[in-house]
Amino acid sequence: MAEMIDKTGEPRSDEELQEAIDCVKEIMVKHSTILPLFTVHALLILNCLEELQTL
């Protein structure tokens, strides 16, 4: 897994962004009843990550 905190200021690779998207989706599916607040905001997180992929 990629290092969570990037102190270099370098943009993330497409692979790292895809890994983050997959992680958010996995958490949404597995923990939707435990983390309802996260599930509500997960779509916003996914939209941001997917938008970063298109840059």
Image: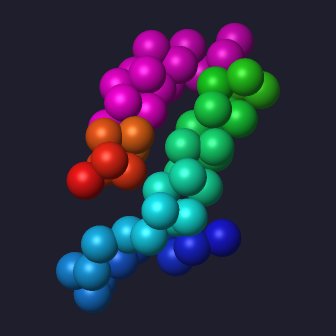
Count of numbered circles in the view:
0
Quadrant of image for the N terminus? bottom right
Query: What residue sits 31% from the left and 40% below the top?
Result: 51
How is the structure coloured here?
Answer: rainbow
**Is residue 3 something that shows in the picture?**
yes
**Is residue 37 something that shows in the picture?**
no
Residue 33: image quadrant is top right
Query: What residue sits 71% from the left and 35% below the top?
Result: 26
- On whether residue 44 falls in the magenta region, the answer is yes
Up-down relation of residue 42 to residue 2 (above or below) = above
47 or 8, nearer to the observer: 47
The residue most toward the right is: 30
In the drawing, does residue 27 fall left or right of residue 13?
right
Tell me where the magenta segment starts and ends, as one range.
32-48
Percent across and percent down for residue 52 are 31, 49
Percent across and percent down for residue 22 are 64, 43
In the drawing, does residue 48 fall left or right of residue 40?
left
In the drawing, does residue 10 fall left or right of residue 5?
left
- On whether residue 6 falls in the magenta region, the answer is no
> Most prominent secondary structure in the magenta stretch?
helix
Residue 24: image quadrant is top right
In the drawing, does residue 31 fall left or right of residue 46?
right
Percent across and percent down for residue 35 are 60, 22
The residue most toward the bottom is: 8
Query: What residue sits 32% from the left and 47% below the top?
Result: 54
Query: What residue sits 55% from the left and 52% below the top?
Result: 18
